C-alpha cells in the first residue's frame, strides 16, 4: 500500500482477513479484550483505529502488524496455522490409513462432530 491506510482501508483489510480465516468480528471480541462497539463505530463513521486496536486485531487474527498491512502478500500453504496446528498435521502425516481414521474419529468426538 503506497498511501496511508484510512479507517475504511483498515475495515476492508480486516474483512479480507476475517473472510480468509472464516472468522467473524465476534470471534475477535472473544479472543481479545476489544469492545464490541469499537469495530462497529469504525464501520459506521470511518474513524481510524488506535494502535492498541490494531494490535488486538492482529493478535486475534494470528498475524503480525507487517502481515496486516501487507496487502500484496498472497497466502502460502500453512500461513494461517499455529505451530501447534502444524505439529498436529505433521504427526497425522506419519500415521497409516487405519491410524488416520481413528485419529479423525477421535478428534471429531472431542469437538462434537
Image (cartoon, rainbow, N blue to C red):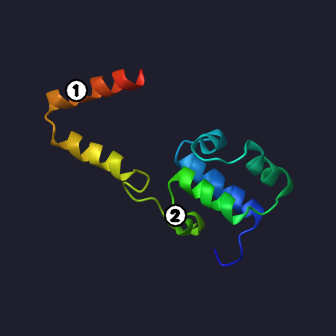
Which residue matches tag 1? 101
Tell me if 31 is positioned left or right of 41 in this view. Answer: left
Q: Are marks 2 and 1 in contact (CB under 8 Å)?
A: no
Where residue 97 appears, as percent x and y from the top left, is: 16, 31
- As displayed, is residue 4 above or below residue 44? below
Crowd rating for badge 2 (residues with CA inside 10 Å; few <14, some 14–19, many 20+) = few
Q: How far across and how far down the image is residue 103, in percent?
A: 24, 29
Query: What's the residue at 78%, 45% (across, down)?
Result: 37
Q: Which residue is mark 2?
A: 64
Q: Percent x, y for residue 52?
A: 67, 61
Q: Which residue appears farthest toward the bottom when viewing the image?
A: 2
Q: Residue at x 79, y 51 (%)?
A: 43
62 vs 32, nearest the viewer: 32
Q: Quadrant of residue 66?
A: bottom right
In this view, the residue in front, 85 or 14, is 85
Quarter of the image with the N terminus in it: bottom right
Within the image, what quadrant is residue 98 found in? top left
Question: Which is more toward the observer, 55 or 102?
Answer: 55
Which residue appears farthest toward the front when viewing the image? 33
Q: SS class of the residue under badge 1? A: helix
Residue 19 sits above or below residue 68 on the image: above
Q: Secondary structure at mark 2?
A: loop
- Packing grade of label 1 (10 A; few <14, some 14-19, many >=20) is few
User: Gap in Å between the C-alphas at discs 2 and 1?
Assistant: 35 Å
Amino acid at each position: 500500500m503506497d498511501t496511508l491506510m484510512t479507517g475504511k482501508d483498515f475495515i476492508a483489510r480486516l474483512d479480507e482477513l476475517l473472510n480468509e480465516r472464516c472468522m467473524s468480528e465476534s470471534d475477535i471480541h472473544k479472543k481479545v479484550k476489544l469492545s464490541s462497539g469499537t469495530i462497529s463505530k469504525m464501520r459506521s463513521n470511518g474513524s481510524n483505529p488506535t494502535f492498541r486496536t490494531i494490535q488486538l486485531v492482529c493478535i486475534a487474527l494470528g498475524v503480525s502488524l507487517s502481515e496486516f498491512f501487507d496487502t500484496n502478500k498472497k497466502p502460502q500453504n500453512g500461513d494461517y496455522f499455529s505451530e501447534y496446528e502444524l505439529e498436529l498435521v505433521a504427526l497425522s502425516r506419519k500415521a497409516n490409513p487405519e491410524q488416520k481414521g481413528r485419529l479423525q474419529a477421535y478428534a471429531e468426538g472431542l469437538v462434537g462432530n
